[in-house]
Image (spheres, rainbow, N blue to C red):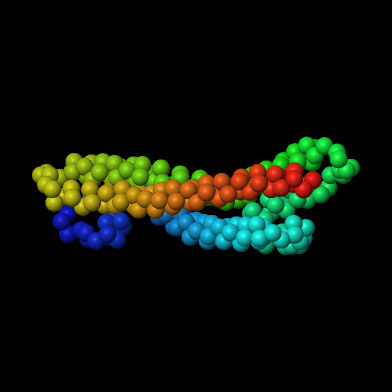
Amino acid sequence: MNVTQDMSVWGLVMQASLFVQLVMLGLLLASLLSWWYIFRKAFVLRQAKADTEAFEKDFWSGGDLNSLYQAAAASKHRVGSLERIFEAGFREFSKVKRPPGSDLSAAIDGTRRAMSATYQREMDMLEQNLAFLASVGSVAPYIGLLGTVWGIMHAFMGLSTVAQATLALVAPGIAEALIATAMGLFAAIPAVLAYNRYSHDIDRLAVRFESFMEEFTNIMQRQG
């Protein structure tokens, strides 16, 4: 070790030990993948909220439910989550043969189960990749710390061949090791913030879906 080492960030990264470089590379890839999921999830949730608001507006405007069902069934792969929940429930309710004056409990139970199954699929889709963001947010700082500890150990081990140890000799090794901690925090902080924000948005959508399912069930009971 010598005082003429390149003290730029890139220079410190290139001078780090192989293990620390691998840690930094892993954290960089995790950060890039996190940002991809963050931007992708932002678009998905924004579209989901817009689709939900649009369908709720159409549903509560007093339009014909059969027309809404036909429109949803005709474009099932392009409609929003709430519209698919409605389409599944209305389809199940329409399939049950009910003589006039008969008990509606079987039809209502089938409608509720059909909507619940679709609801679970839609929630799984909305929550996709959130587990990765949570993992990065919780694990990345510790991975960065592991790289830092290893780098500091490597720096102090290098002092064993030096007659007189000084701060100038050990500082570059410590600095390059601390970059791993910084990269761990850089990967973790956006992932944690995005996870908390998106979890809140998904929870609010889930409440709207569940409320609609209950209200739609009541409408089917009255109109049955």
Percent position of residue 162, x then y:
15, 45
Say which quarter of the image contains residue 97.
top right
Residue depicted at x 17% and y 54%: 2
Residue depicted at x 57% and y 61%: 50
* Residue 222 horizontal side relative to residue 176, left or right: right
Q: Is residue 107 visible?
A: yes
Q: Is residue 4 above or below residue 178?
A: below
Q: Is residue 21 visible?
A: no
Percent position of residue 29, x then y:
44, 55
Q: Nearer the viewer, residue 60 or 205?
A: 60
Q: Nearer the viewer, residue 201 or 17?
A: 201
Residue depicted at x 41% and y 42%: 138
Q: Nearer the viewer, residue 48 or 33?
A: 48
* Residue 4 horizontal side relative to residue 151, left or right: left
Percent position of residue 78, x then y:
67, 62
Say which quarter of the image contains residue 77.
bottom right
* Residue 100 horizontal side relative to residue 24, left or right: right
Quarter the C terminus occupies:
top right
Given the current orientation, which residue lies at the most extreme right position?
Answer: 99
Residue depicted at x 71% and y 47%: 219
The mark tally for this picture is 0
Percent position of residue 107, x then y:
79, 41
